[in-house]
Amino acid sequence: MKQLSTVYTDNGDADKNPVSMDYKYKYLALVLILALTFIHLFCMVVYPESLMANKLILIVVLAMMFYIWMRELKDKKTLQLLNENLLHAQEKLERAEIDVISALILTAEAKDPYTHGHSKRVAAYSLAIAQEMHLSEEEQKIIERAAILHDLGKIGIDDSILRKDDILSDKEWEIMKGHPQKSIDILDPLKFLEKEKEIILSHHEMIDGSGYPNGLQGEAIPLGSRIIAVADAFDAMNTARSYRAALPEENIIEELNKSSGTHLSADVTNVFLNILDKSPEFWNRAIT
Ligand SMILES: [Fe+2]
């Protein structure tokens, strides 16, 4: 694709926009057309017998109109190219911002061997579910991004709470429950992530309304959040924690079935169980 800088320097002058330069020529052509039209009318009235001169003027006018039309087409193409390049640059910038945040999450997770790679795995499971549910590519992209960023707010929670081997006190639990809101507070300046933020905020909501932060029920919970909840629960059971080993496969399936329809969405759980059945590589904890 032609680069933005190339478009601006096509006429050899980096300070001048080619589109505005073209307009000068077009205005000049329009003034000439008007002048020639006036001369043409004048000739028709004063020298009606001079057909040859009239035809000549007419041909010149038509040629200039053709020139203006060609210029319009060229401008349209240039503007389209500029627009495409701007969109491309914006996409690259957004991707870079997400990459920086993802790197931050991965660094934070890397400190703890029990959560190392958690967000990346949850994103891989969530994407697989979204694909299996035949969601649009745009929805898949949003869900994958939300899954990578879902626990971003934990960065602001003290390690003594995050890595506590014992049961959390009420106060500590309240702090822990604040992480979805913290995640979206951190992402607040990134306005292009509005849908992702909505999904992240509700990733701990439960179908029966017993989740947090808002106690949403059933389909009031965004689909992306319901998908991440299943992926998150699976990864938590399928990896070791400081206080327990990873659960055996049959126990994980049993737990997923038990939570289906109460804590987890039944539809999403069924889809994920089918995926695990068809793609045993998802059991591999090395997926990153
Ligand atoms: Fe979470």
Image (cartoon, grey):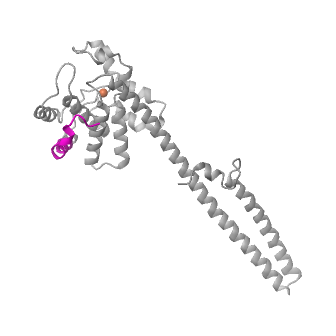
- Left or right, 24 with respect to 131, comes to right
Image location (x, y in percent) of residue 76: 60, 59
Q: How many marks?
A: 0
Q: Is residue 221 visible?
A: no
Name the residue at the bottom extreme: 49
Q: Is residue 180 visible?
A: yes
Instruction: Tell me the magenta residue range.
Output: 270-288
Identify the residue at image location x=50%, y=47%.
Answer: 88
Identify the residue at image location x=39%, y=20%.
Answer: 156
- Residue 275 belongs to the span the image colors magenta: yes
Q: Main secondary structure of the magenta part?
A: helix
Task: Give ligand 1's quarter of the image.
Answer: top left
- Left or right, 28 with respect to 260, comes to right
Q: Quadrant of residue 268?
A: top left
Front residue of 76/11: it is 11
Q: Quadrant of residue 32?
A: bottom right
Q: Quadrant of the C terminus?
A: top left
Front residue of 14/127: it is 14
Front residue of 27/244: it is 244
Identify the residue at image location x=35%, y=23%.
Answer: 154
- Residue 20 belongs to the span the image colors magenta: no
Q: Is residue 32 above or below residue 196?
A: below
Q: Is residue 100 above or below residue 136?
A: above
Image location (x, y in percent) of residue 173: 28, 17
Image location (x, y in percent) of residue 264: 21, 34
- Left or right, 22 with respect to 4, comes to right
